[in-house]
């Protein structure tokens, strides 16, 4: 008994130490980025186009391109992922074929993002002729987020009590009516959590976009889904690879902008989720 208590205390101390080290490292990285790039942030930086001169370079095409890209990625990936999860969880049979599908979906969630870039290059850019368009980039990132969306949605659906379904059936509702009016509203907070995680990963991805040939330098804003595009991670990658010190400062400022966009997107999704939960509770 005493030795077990010592083990638990030691384990808690080790985990607390590891957590503290991780937080300190994260804080050091954020402080370093803020120290280098905060003074570069300005309205001129946000509304200017890229330039060969670091003091004139701006981030507008990359910022707008990232917003368009993540919106189109969500429009493609979220409906397909939720629909696939509903079918697998509510309609699919429990047999060997479904187990193979589940294993492959779980494996796809851990596949490196560059593999999705190769898939997007072969399928969307070349086979389907999308070229280096905004649609090709969004479709590639939609493939990237699909496994996470499917897995998180299935877990949220599993968390809904079976008694809720049985009560709906007892009142004469069909299976689809039960799913639409009872199961999905109850599972929505969990689904939104999975969407936050998946889109947060997508907005920071660079490798898939580099592989499909998205330009790192773009002097205009995309005007449609077939237009060429760039994104914040690509612009940051381009500036980091430049030898001039001014571009390193621009890269730090771009990282801050990307973090702000990411936090704003997550905060909006969390606010919507919490608001929906409060409305359901009342």
Image (cartoon, grey):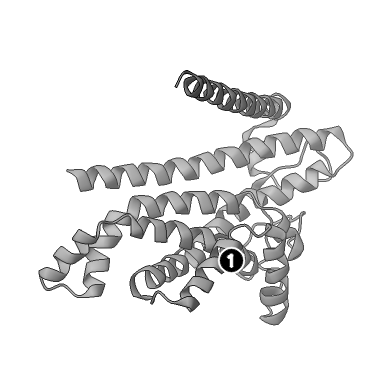
Would you name the residue on which mark 1 appears? 143
User: Percent position (x, y) of residue 159?
Assistant: 32, 54
Asked if residue 94 lies left or right of residue 237, the reply is left
Choose top left, top right, bottom left or bottom right for residue 89. Answer: bottom left
Q: Tell me if residue 132 comes above or below residue 128 in the rendering.
A: above
On-image quarter of the C terminus: top left
Q: Secondary structure at mark 1?
A: helix
Q: Tell me if residue 202 comes above or below residue 130 in the rendering.
A: above
Which residue corresponds to the image point at 47% horizontal and 60% vertical from the top-left?
A: 151
Asked if residue 239 lies left or right of residue 129, the reply is right
Q: Tell me if residue 53 comes above or below residue 226 in the rendering.
A: above
Towards the viewer: 260 or 225:
260
Residue 223 visible somewhere in the drawing: no
Outermost residue toward the front? 1
User: Percent position (x, y) of residue 147?
Assistant: 53, 62
Towards the viewer: 242 or 173:
173
How busy is the neighbourhood of tag 1: few (under 14 within 10 Å), some, or many (20 plus)?
A: many
User: Percent position (x, y) of residue 74?
Assistant: 50, 60
Residue 230 visible somewhere in the drawing: yes
Which residue corresponds to the image point at 46% horizontal and 66% vertical from the top-left?
A: 81
Towards the viewer: 162 or 11:
11
User: Percent position (x, y) of residue 67?
Assistant: 56, 53
């Amino acid at each position: 008994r005493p030795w077990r208590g010592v083990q638990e205390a030691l384990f808690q101390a080790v985990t607390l130490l590891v957590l503290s080290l991780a937080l300190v490292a994260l804080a050091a990285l954020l402080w370093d980025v803020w120290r280098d790039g905060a003074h570069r942030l300005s309205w001129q930086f946000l509304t200017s186009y890229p330039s060969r001169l670091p003091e004139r370079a701006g981030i507008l095409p990359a910022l707008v391109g990232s917003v368009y890209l993540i919106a189109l990625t969500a429009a493609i990936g979220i409906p397909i992922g939720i629909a696939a999860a509903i079918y697998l969880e509510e309609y699919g049979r429990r047999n060997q074929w479904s187990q193979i599908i589940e294993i492959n979906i779980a494996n796809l969630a851990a596949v490196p993002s560059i593999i999705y870039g190769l898939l997007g290059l072969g399928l969307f850019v070349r086979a389907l002729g999308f070229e280096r368009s905004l649609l090709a980039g969004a479709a590639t990132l939609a493939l990237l987020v699909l496994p996470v969306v499917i897995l998180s949605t299935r877990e949220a659906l599993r968390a809904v009590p079976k008694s809720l379904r049985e009560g709906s059936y007892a009142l004469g509702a069909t299976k689809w009516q039960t799913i639409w009016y009872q199961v999905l509203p109850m599972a929505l907070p969990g689904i939104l959590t999975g969407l936050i995680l998946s889109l947060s990963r997508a907005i920071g991805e660079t490798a898939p976009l580099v592989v499909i040939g998205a330009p790192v330098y773009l002097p205009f804003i995309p005007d449609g889904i077939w237009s060429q595009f760039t994104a914040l991670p690509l612009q940051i990658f381009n500036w980091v690879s430049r030898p001039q010190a001014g571009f390193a400062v621009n890269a730090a400022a771009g990282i801050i902008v990307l973090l702000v966009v990411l936090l704003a997107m997550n905060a909006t999704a969390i606010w919507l989720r919490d608001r929906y939960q409060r409305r359901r509770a009342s």
